[in-house]
Amino acid sequence: MKKEKMKLWNKIVVGILVIILIAIIGIIAYKLYGLIDMDNRFQAFEKIPTVETKGKLSYDKEKNFAKVEGMDYVFQDGIGVKIDSINITDDTFKANVNFKLNKEFDYKMLSFSYVVYDENKNIYQIFSGMHFGENEKYDYNAIFMEKELGVYNNKDIYSLYLANSGGIGNISVNENEKTAINDIHIETRDKFPKSNKIYIKIFDIGYLDVSKGENDQMNIKNIDLSNSKWLFEFNIPDEMNKRETINLKLANEIPGLEISKITLTETKFVMNFKSEEYLNLIASGKDMVGDEFRRRCEEMLNITDGEGNKYQEGSGGTIGDGGYSVSFNITKKDLAKKLFINFKVGDKEYKSELIESK
């Protein structure tokens, strides 16, 4: 009897071990398949035709941007691409990308992917614009670009970016000429390096086809126009790398407004702060209609100058430790007019001049 029980127990143990072994083999096989699949995809990505073009930048100090001199469209798959201008400050990168298209569609829906990096392989950002609802392909693009640059770390694929946010936007279209100008706009989490060379790679050009389905449900399709890459190389003018960020502070403290950082560059003013009243207003914004939310925010916190001009808020968002970051369309030139922060809570109004923090 004992022997029969022992045999039964041995069979159970062996069966469990076989199941565990099969599971382990399955996991290994799945991971191995994933690696092989990624390697095959990367090899195909590497083989995509790439045209390399060098451009020359002419820096305009007054307008604080560098214009690309005499660049013609570079054509692949019947599509022409060129870069019109580049602008770099400590916190912002911008580039105007000009497209000559070979198909009629709503040019405002043009989309593309890009990577911006410098001679030291500092990645400003990798952005996939042609993969609405395709998160896997979005991640693959980031991995493949990092692999091409030799910096892939197999951990957090987005940790290498200097960008805090970024993307593309339409500036203008000319349907008669079949052209569209889009901008690349990247905001950094700290400071962009003073790079000597900038590389802009454009790929995955296409557009988003938007239509209404049943019950007015929006249907969005990614329509590919090209399976090629364009790589543009630029030497950054010395004048652009002479930029400096000005740090500001309040001449007098304002109750209820705890400011941790105020910076001013050639193109933007950014303030990081904490305010219970302001964050409560942000939280209640979902219940406001139309322009009421923006009006209420500007009423509570705004910036004016000594000539009575009020500056419009550009963008804002929450940051760590319960803080908030807001930008205004203010440049270094505006500092000569004397700038003031105005903060209103209830029936109490506070005002303080902004001065340089030495």
Image: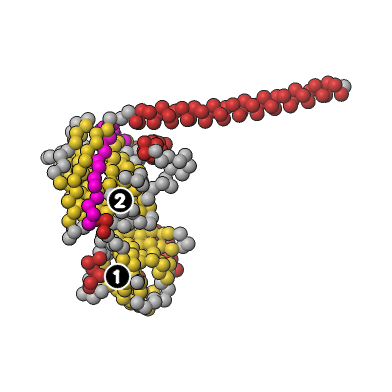
Type of amino acid at the residue the image marks with label 1:
Ile
| Quadrant of res 317 | bottom left
Say which mark, if any, is on residue 195: 2
Name the residue at 45% across, 59% down.
Answer: 320
| Quadrant of res 357 | bottom left
Instruction: Give x and y (percent) for residue 236.
Output: 24, 50
As helix, strand or loop, the secondary structure at mark 2 comes to loop
Quadrant occupied by the C terminus: bottom left
Residue closer to the observer: 108 or 147:
147
**Number of other residues with Cα within 10 Å of mark 1, as a class: few under 14, some 14 to 19, many 20 or more:** many
Q: Residue furthest left?
A: 176
**Number of other residues with Cα within 10 Å of mark 2, as a class: few under 14, some 14 to 19, many 20 or more:** some
Q: Earlier in the sequence, mark 1 or mark 2?
A: 2
| Quadrant of res 234 | top left
Say which mark, if any, is on residue 303: 1
Residue segment shown in magenta: 222-239
Type of amino acid at the residue the image marks with label 2:
Ser
Residue closer to the observer: 124 or 58:
58
Q: Is residue 296 left or right of residue 154?
A: left
> 180 above or below 32?
below
Residue closer to the observer: 70 or 271:
70
Instruction: Give x and y (percent) for residue 344.
Output: 36, 74
- Note whether residue 355 is visible: yes
